[in-house]
Image (cartoon, rainbow, N blue to C red):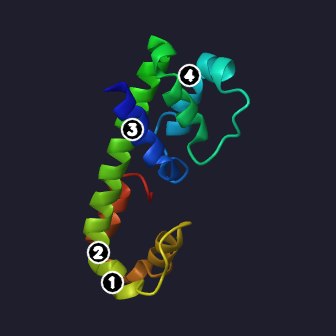
Amino acid sequence: MKKIVISSIAICVTLLFVISAGAGQSIVETVANGCKTEIDAYCKDVIPGEGRVLACLYARSDKLSGKCEYALYDAAAQLERAVAALSYVVNECADDLNQFCTGVAAGEGRLMDCLEKNDPKVSSRCKDAMKQVGLKE
């Protein structure tokens, strides 16, 4: 089970830099703080990025402390909530995205920028969804 969680986090590592955990630490900070001892001991020579640190932790999953295991499970739960929130917003804003943002490539905040540029025309349904998940004040 531990390996599945670590693998899931590694697969979704690109989302780690886009989606924060909300009021608390980011997902990256959760793992970095909770697994500091293991990262320093086993992964100090690993260049961060593209899931390499998570792959290193995965390779040493039999040596992880309870604190690190908890941090990985917590990060997985945060990631699951973030993906659910993002899916909710995409669902609620689908009509607005289709109407105002066709041709805009996803990534690097371009769709959010498009919705912000069209804010007066964006539906209240979409705006409410963004507020509910903390993407908009």
> In the figure, 108 relative to 5: above or below?
below
Residue at horizontal 32%, vertical 62%? 89
Residue of label 2? 94
> In the figure, 81 relative to 122: above or below?
above
Residue 36 at what x, y percent from top left? 62, 21
Residue of label 4? 35
Neighbourhood count class around disc 4 (C-alpha, 10 Å): few under 14, some 14–19, many 20 upward = many
Residue 61 at what x, y percent from top left? 47, 22
Residue 114 in view here: yes
Q: Secondary structure at mark 1?
A: helix
Neighbourhood count class around disc 2 (C-alpha, 10 Å): few under 14, some 14–19, many 20 upward = few
Neighbourhood count class around disc 3 (C-alpha, 10 Å): few under 14, some 14–19, many 20 upward = many
Q: Marks 4 and 3, Cα distance to the nearest angstrom?
A: 16 Å
Q: Secondary structure at mark 3?
A: helix
Dot 3 or dot 2, earlier in sequence: 3
As rendered, which of 69 and 119 lies closer to the eye? 69
Check disc 2 and give the amino acid type. Ala
Residue of label 1? 98
Q: Considering the image in quadrants, where does the N terminus appear?
A: top left
Q: Secondary structure at mark 4?
A: loop
Q: Are marks 1 and 2 in contact (CB under 8 Å)?
A: yes
Q: Marks 3 and 2, Cα distance to the nearest angstrom?
A: 24 Å
Residue 25 at what x, y percent from top left? 52, 34
The numbered mark at residue 78 is 3
Q: Marks 1 and 2, Cα distance to the nearest angstrom?
A: 6 Å
Dot 2 or dot 4, earlier in sequence: 4
Q: Secondary structure at mark 2?
A: helix
Check disc 3 and give the amino acid type. Gln
Mark 4 or 1: in front is 4
Dot 3 or dot 1, earlier in sequence: 3
Q: Quadrant of residue 115?
A: bottom left
